[in-house]
Image (cartoon, rainbow, N blue to C red):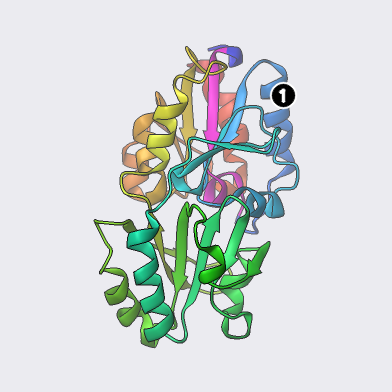
Amino acid sequence: MRYADTVLFSDLDGTLFNSRGEVSAENVAAIRYYMSRGGRFAISTGRQPDNALFYWPGAETNAPSVVLNGAAVYDFSAGVYSHCVTIPRAGLDPVLRAVLREIPGADVQMYIAGGIRYVTPESTANRQFLDLHRPCAFTSLEALEGEGVFKCLLYAPPAQEEALRAVLARGEGTAYRIVPGTTDVGGVITYYELLPLGVSKGTAIDALRTHPDLAGRTFLAAGDYWNDYELLRAVDTAVAPANAIQEIRAVSRFVTADNNHHAIARIICDIIPEM
């Protein structure tokens, strides 16, 4: 298949990024070659754009990217959001106030168009969780009144995790959906993500089908974890790196090299030309 007939969406963590959080020179070279031949390359991530740029300066893309696990689409070249879906504040704010009141050790992050905002103090923030979500700013829930919120991330120390989950359940299924997550960067940590109802990476892909620069192209995507499941089901051709969880490999047409062996380069150089 010609590169000019395709668009490739890549997850970041566990797919484009290696286990050190880096984009290999092999992946960068392959992406540049792909784009020079007419291919459209974008990312599909749970990260906020500034946070993605923090780990991948430049973010070499030439198509609108899926960010915030599908709550928005972002054009890195223009610095513009589109297809934005937010959590209703009437259902979100009472729950966050309860977390602040009842779970004193919690970290609460709110994701708005301006970036990541902590509404809990920096002095009590879990250092690992904080370092994974830079750049960010510390403020108050009251100061963000009226802001559209794409998603929230919350963490509590293990002894308070059950209590946090119980508080979050008060708005589950009415104001937002809860997506548990884990990271092992710097040590295993469990967190909870609040997303707008009905939102996933897959719904953002559906919205991008009509984008004038992408219409008619074959949509490919690569991802490794649960938040990529709807993404891979929404595209025409799904690819999993070898390190992906079994459920992701099961819904993928191809399994390629793992994220430490240039998975995206292998898709560009080996898989697309043979399709």
**Magenta-span inclusion, residue 151:** no
Residue at 58%, 64% (x, y): give it. 117
Q: Amino acid at mark 1?
A: Tyr
Residue 226 rendering spot, x and y as whole percentages? 37, 50
Residue holding disc 1? 33
Residue 136 rendering spot, x and y as whole percentages? 65, 64
Q: Nearer the viewer, residue 259 or 196?
A: 196
Residue at 61%, 27% (x, y): give it. 63
Is residue 190 depicted above or below 257 in this figure?
below
Is residue 210 depicted above or below 10 in this figure?
above
SS at mark 1 in the image? helix
Q: Nearer the viewer, residue 192 or 168?
A: 168
Q: Nearer the viewer, residue 222 or 78?
A: 78
**Magenta-span inclusion, residue 17:** yes
Residue at 58%, 31% (x, y): give it. 64
Magenta segment range?
5-18
